[in-house]
Image: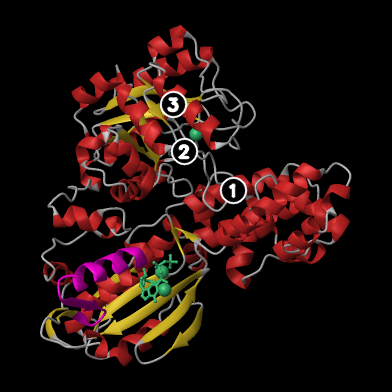
Amino acid sequence: MATNAEIAGRFEEFADLLEADDVEYKPRAYRRAAENIRAHPVPIADRVEAGDEEVLEEIDGVGDAISSKIVEYVDTGEIEELEELRAELPIDIADITRIEGVGPKTAGTLYRELGVRTLDDLEAVAEAGEIQEISGFGPKTEENIRDNIEFAREVGQRQLLGEARPLADDVLEFLEGVEAVERCEVAGSIRRWRETIGDVDVLVATEVGEDVIEAFVGWDSVDSEIESGPEKASVRVGEIRVDLRVVVPAEFGSALQYFTGSKDHNVRLRNYAIARDMKLNEYGAFDVSAVDDPDSGQRVGERVAGETEEGMYSSLGLPWIPPELRTDRGEIAAAENGDLPDLITREDVRGDLHSHTEWSDGNTSIEAMVEAAAEMGYEYYGVADHAEGPGIVGGMGLSDTEIIEQIEAIREVAAASDIAVFAGIEANVTADGEISLSAEVLEALDVVVASPHSALDQDAETATERLVRAVENPAIDVLGHPSGRLLNERSGLDFDATALGAAAAEHDTALEINANPRRLDLWGSAVQAALENGAPISINTDAHQPSTLEYMRWGVHTARRGWAEPADVINTWELEELREFLH
Ligand code: DGT
Ligand code: CA
Ligand code: CA
Ligand code: ZN
C-alpha cells in the first residue's frame, strides 16, 4: 500500500519532469499538492482503496485533476501521464537535482544537450569538460557539479527519520500482535533517532523464530521480500528496507545493545569492557578474568548479563545509556562519572514558538493553529509568519504594515484563547547577519525568530560571522534553522557551533532546533557544542498546518541527541520565565 510520502514523491517527480520539459505553472501546483499530501495525517491510499475518495477533498491544493491521478495511482500503481513523461525524459531527476544548484530545468538541458540521464553520466560529462560548452553554462557551473556529485550520491541512499520512524512504529505494532513474539524493539540508527536512516532494524525475542519470520515476511504492508532465513529476514516496504532479527529471550538485551550501535559507541564500550576483564558481544556480557584466551570463542567466560540492556551496562558498573547518546561523543565517560544528562522528554515541552499561518505561506488561520496548539495541551504558542525578504517565495512575506495588522489579529485570537499566544515574526537574516524590521514593528512583537533563507553557500568563516552577528542583535530572540540545510537536498551553511553557542549564551539568544524532519537544524553534535557553551535552545516545528505541530517529536529526540536537559530549552520554561527571556 502506497504511503502518503510515496504518493507525494510521485507528484514531486512529475513536477520536476514537467519543469525539465519547460512547462509552466503546473510544476508549482504539483509541488504544493505533494507537500500537503506528505503532511496529511490520514493515510490516503487506504481510504481511497476503501472507496472513500472524499478524503482527497480535504487536502489543500488537490483539485479534480490531481485527485483522479491519485486514484489512478492507488488503483493501478502508475500514473499514465507520468509514465509518458518518463519515457520522453528518461532522467533520474531526483538524483540529479540533489546536486546543489542543479534544478529540473538544468537537468532537462543537460539531457537534451548531452544525453545525461544519471549521476554517472553527469560525472562523465563534467570530467570531460563538456558542460561548460553548453550555452548559458560556464566553468563555474561545471566545477560546482563536479564538487557536489559525491554528496548527491551519498544522500540519495538514506530516508528521513520522519518517514522511516512511523513505518518502524507500524512494524513494532504488527509484531506485538504476533503470538510467538515475547519482546520487540527497533535497533540501529532509528533507535538512536538519527536524522536519516539507511534501513530500519528490528529485533525480536522469541523461542520460535521461524514463526516470527514467517509472519513478518507475510505482513500486509510488505512490498517485496529481499531475503529470509531462520534467524533474520529483510523486506522492502515502499522505499524502505526493514531488517528483522530474532534471538532467544536470554540474549535480547545483548543483541539489542549490539545492534543499536553506533559502531563507534560499541567499539569504545567493548574496549572499556576489555580493560575490566570483561567481554561484550551480541550474545552477552562475559567475565573473562579466569579465562586464558578470551578470543577463543563467542561465549567464553562466565556469562553475567544478556537478557536486558540495563544488565549489559551494569555489568560494567555503568548506568544504562539512552540510545540517542550512543555516538561516542563522551557518553561512556559521562556514564562512568555519573554525569549523564537528565534528557528532555516530549512531556517537558510547554509550547511551540515558530509556526506559520495563511498570513504568509501557511495553510490555515491563526485561530485554527492556536486551537490545535491548545488541544495538544500547550500552555503557550507563537505565530511567526515570514517577513518579506530574499529567499521567501514571491510575495509571501509580510511588509511592516501587514505585520502590524497581523499583530492585532493575533491579539484578538489570544484574547479568546485559553493559552498564551505570542505575536512573532520569522525575519530573514541577510548575508551580513542583519534583519530589516522597523523599530515600531520590533517594539510591537513578542518574539523575533530570525533565520537564513538565502546566501547559503558562504564559507564557514563568513557564515559563522553572519550567524554570530545575528545572535548579537538584541532584537532577535531565536535564531531559526541556523544552517538552512534541507536533508537530502542541500547542505546549508557550515559554521562553528562552539563560537555560535558562546555568542548565543552571552547575548541571551536561543538557537533553534527546527523540528521539521526535512531540516532537523540544529542537529545533535551542534546542539551539544552549543550547550557546552551555555546557549539557550528552542525546539520549534515551523508548522505550516495543524498536523505538522506533531513534528515536535523529531525535535525533542534531536535535542536529546544534543544532550539537552529540560532547563536548556526555553519552551519547557514556565510562561513568566519565558516572557522575561523574550522581553
Ligand atoms: P543506517 O542503517 O545506515 O542508518 O545505520 P545503522 O547504525 O542502523 O547501521 P546498520 O543497519 O548497518 O547496523 C545496525 C547496527 O548493528 C549498527 O548500528 C551497529 C551494529 N553492527 C553490528 N555489526 C556491525 C558491523 O559489523 N559493522 C557495523 N558498522 N555495525 C555493526
Ligand atoms: Ca539500520
Ligand atoms: Ca540493517
Ligand atoms: Zn524559515
Three-letter amino acid code at the position of disc 1: Ala
Residue matched to label 2: 544
Side of 464 relative to 504 (left or right): right
Mark 1 and mark 3: span between their CA atoms?
37 Å
Give whichever of 283, 62 is nearer the camera: 283
Q: Nearer the viewer, mark 3 or mark 2?
A: 3
Q: Is residue 271 magenta?
A: yes
Three-letter amino acid code at the position of disc 3: Val
Three-letter amino acid code at the position of disc 2: His
Where ligand 3 lies, by quadrant?
bottom left
Residue matched to label 1: 33
Residue range of the region highlighted in magenta in the rendering: 263-284
User: How many residues crowd around disc 3 within 10 Å: few (fewer than 14), some, or many (20 or more)?
Assistant: many
Secondary structure at badge 3 equals helix
Side of 120 relative to 47 (left or right): right
Mark 3 and mark 2: span between their CA atoms?
27 Å
Residue matched to label 3: 468
Side of 437 relative to 213 (left or right): right
Q: Position of residue 316 (x, y in %)?
A: 13, 68
Mark 2 and mark 1: span between their CA atoms?
14 Å
Give whichever of 363, 113 is nearer the camera: 113
Counting residues from the N terminus, which is met first, the one under dot 2 or under dot 1? 1
